Amino acid sequence: MKWKIILSVLLAGILWIPAFAQVPGNAEDISPLLYGEKIPEIPVTAVDGSRHTITSVIDDKPSILLFYRGGWCPYCNTHLAEIQEIEEEIIELGYQIIAISPDSPENLNKSAGTHKLSYELYSDGDGSLSKAMGIVFKAPERNANRLLESSGGLNEGFLPVPSVFVVDTSGKIVFEYINPDYKTRIRAELLIAVLKVLKNDGE
């Protein structure tokens, strides 16, 4: 029996590691986590440099996890600002906003100040969380230097597909919006409509 248990553990490790390590070459080929799955216990870095698992960041509160490419992306900045405009309504519905990108804490601070963002920003510089969420692909070579610089030297050539996950207090995904076209984001009014439905349904 003991050897069977050991073999099962080893096989699980063999199957898990390649799935986590492989990064697709195109945004269209990502394999994100699905409705009903739970987000992983992976640390992210706050703007003050402190480390927290993403589940502890949720802090037993329904949350909107907004993954974006970085403060260098104008489409991301526009979307961050649009979400800021509906933050009060989101809070009234009982949710919090958590935005995550490969940007370093220093660059997150710059984004928060420039766009007057009052919700929390976290750094996933090496992409550990984004990879585990299944939303990462290999960045075009032309972006390599910019990604290294913006992440404080941690991003070695990946991009997250801009994504929005709504999770309940246990970290279970109850809604997601993921579009391989980085120019297309979920509109503020649609997100509010989704949150209202989830609230009425008791998530």
Image: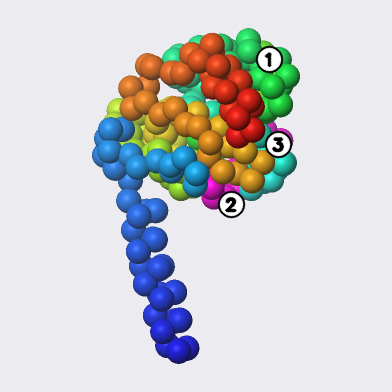
For residue 57, which quarter of the picture? top right
Q: Earlier in the sequence, mark 3 or mark 1?
A: 3
**Magenta stretch holds residue 47:** yes
**Residue type beneath disc 3:** Lys
Q: Which mark is residue 89?
A: 1
88 to 152, vertically: above or below: above
Residue located beneath label 2 in the image: 41
149 to 74, vertically: above or below: below
Q: Secondary structure at mark 2?
A: loop
Q: Gap in Å between the C-alphas at discs 2 and 1?
A: 28 Å
Residue ID at (60%, 44%): 171
The answer to whether residue 90 is seen in the rendering is: yes
Dot 2 and dot 1 residues touching (CB under 8 Å): no
**Residue type beneath disc 1:** Glu
Binning the other alpha carbons within 10 Å of mark 3 as few (below 14), some (14 to 19) or many (20 upward) gives some
73 to 103, vertically: above or below: above
Binning the other alpha carbons within 10 Å of mark 2 as few (below 14), some (14 to 19) or many (20 upward) gives some
Residue span colored magenta: 38-48
Relative image position of residue 55 (x, y in whole percent): 64, 46
Query: Which residue is farthest front?
Result: 201
Residue ID at (70%, 36%): 61
Q: Which mark is residue 152?
A: none
Relative image position of residue 92 (x, y in whole percent): 73, 19
For residue 4, which quarter of the picture? bottom left
Q: Earlier in the sequence, mark 2 or mark 1?
A: 2
42 to 79, vertically: above or below: below
Q: Secondary structure at mark 3?
A: loop
